[in-house]
Image (tube, helix red, strand yellow):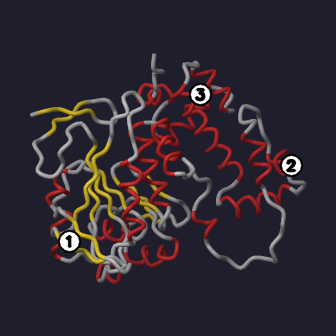
Amino acid sequence: MAVSPRPDGAERPEPAGTVFRHPGRHRVAVFVLPGVIPFELGIPLRIFGNARSTEDDRKLYEIVTCGVTPGRVRTDADFDIVVEHGVEALAEADTVVVPASHELGPVFTDGVLSPELAAAFGRFRPGARTVSICTGSFLIAAAGLLDGRPATTHWSSADHFQRLFPRVKVDPDVLYVDDGDVLTSAGVAAGIDVCLHIVRRDFGTAVANAVARRTVVPPHREGGQAQFIRRPLPEPQLASTERARSWALDRLHEPLTLRQLAARESMSVRTFTRRFREEVGTSPGQWLTQQRVEHARHLLESTDLGIDAVARQAGFGTAASMRQHLQAALGVSPSTYRRTFHVTARP
C-alpha cells in the first residue's frame, strides 16, 4: 500500500483506487444531481484544478465528477452533462463537494433524502470532508451532517432552511462557514470563496493567492451576504467608506480608532458605523480584526519575523493579543500556524 502526503504534512495510507488515479493528490469528488447548476458545478474544478505546489508546480488535487449512477445528468440550462462515475467515487474521496440543484424535490420541500440519496451519502469515506455550494446545504443537512453545527446557505433560502432543519445553527449573513470536516457556502459565487478558503487551509496562502490570480478573482472577499441582500433604503447617497478602508489597510500596524476612520470620510461615528455595515456586512471593528488576522497569516507564512514582530506589524501590539485572535479565527496558535504553512523560499 502506497502512502501520500496530507496537506498537514503527515502521511496517509493510499489504498488502491478504481476512480482516482493519481496517488499523492488530494481526492475531490463533485457529487451532482439532476437539475445541477452549471456555474456551481464548474467551481471546484476551476479552483482546485488550478492549485499547484509552489515548490515543483505539481497539481495538488485530483477532481472527478460523479452522480448516483454514471451517465447523463440534466442541468438547469439547455444542455446535459455526462458523468463517468457513480457513488464509488464517494467512497474514495478525501473531500466531497455538493453543488446546488434546482430539482431537490423532497429534500427541499420536506428535508428528507430519497433512499438512493441516503445510500449515496452512506458511501462517504469515514473522515472525508463535505462541502456544499449554495443550496447543496439542503442535501447535507438532510443527511444529518449539520445537526448541532453552524452552517449557511443562499440568503433567499435561509429562513426555509432553518425551518426545515431546526437543529442547524444557520448564519444567513456570511459567505461560508468552516466547521472543520463540514463546510457550507452561500449562494452561487460564494462557492469560489469557500473553495479558495479550502485551498488556503490545505496548502497555504501562497497557493490560494496564485489560484485566485489565475482565476481573476479576489483571494478573499470582505463582508458577507448582507451586502447583497436587497433592503428598503433611503435615497442613494454618494458617501462611501471605501477611502477609510484603503487608508486603514495601509496602517494596520498602527492603533486605529473608529473616530479616525469616520474622520477619513467626514462622517460622524454613528453614520460611519451604519454605512460601513451596509457596505461591508460587518462592523468596522470586526473588519479591522479580520484584516489584521489575514496580514498576520501572510507574515507567518512568508517571512521569518519573530512572533512579537509579526504581532506588531499586524497591529495586534503583543504576541498574546495576536495569539488570542488567531486562536479565535483559525483555531491554532501563531507558532502552530507557522509550522504548518510557512513557505521556505526556493534557492
Q: Residue at x 37, y 79 (%)?
A: 76
Relative height, residue 297 to residue 274 (above, below) = above
- The answer to which of 56 and 48 lies nearer the viewer is 56
Q: Residues within 10 Å of mark 3 (few under 14, many from 20)?
A: some
Q: Is residue 322 above or below residue 28?
A: above
Q: Which residue is mark 2?
A: 264
Residue count near mark 1 (Cα–Cα under 10 Å), binned few <14, some 14–19, many ≥20: some
Left or right of 177: which side holds 126?
A: left
Residue 48 in percent (x, y) is at 37, 49
Question: Which of disc 1 and disc 3 is earlier in sequence?
Answer: 1
| Residue pictured at 41% horizontal, 44% vertical | 199
| Mark toward the start of the polypeptide (3 vs 2) | 2
Locate residue 149: give its quadrant.
Answer: bottom left
Residue at the spot 47% in from the left edge and 67% down from the top edge: 188
For residue 320, the mark is: 3
Q: Position of residue 332 (x, y in %)?
A: 45, 35
User: Which secondary structure, mark 1?
Assistant: helix
Q: Quadrant of residue 10?
A: top left
Amino acid on which disc 2 is placed: Arg
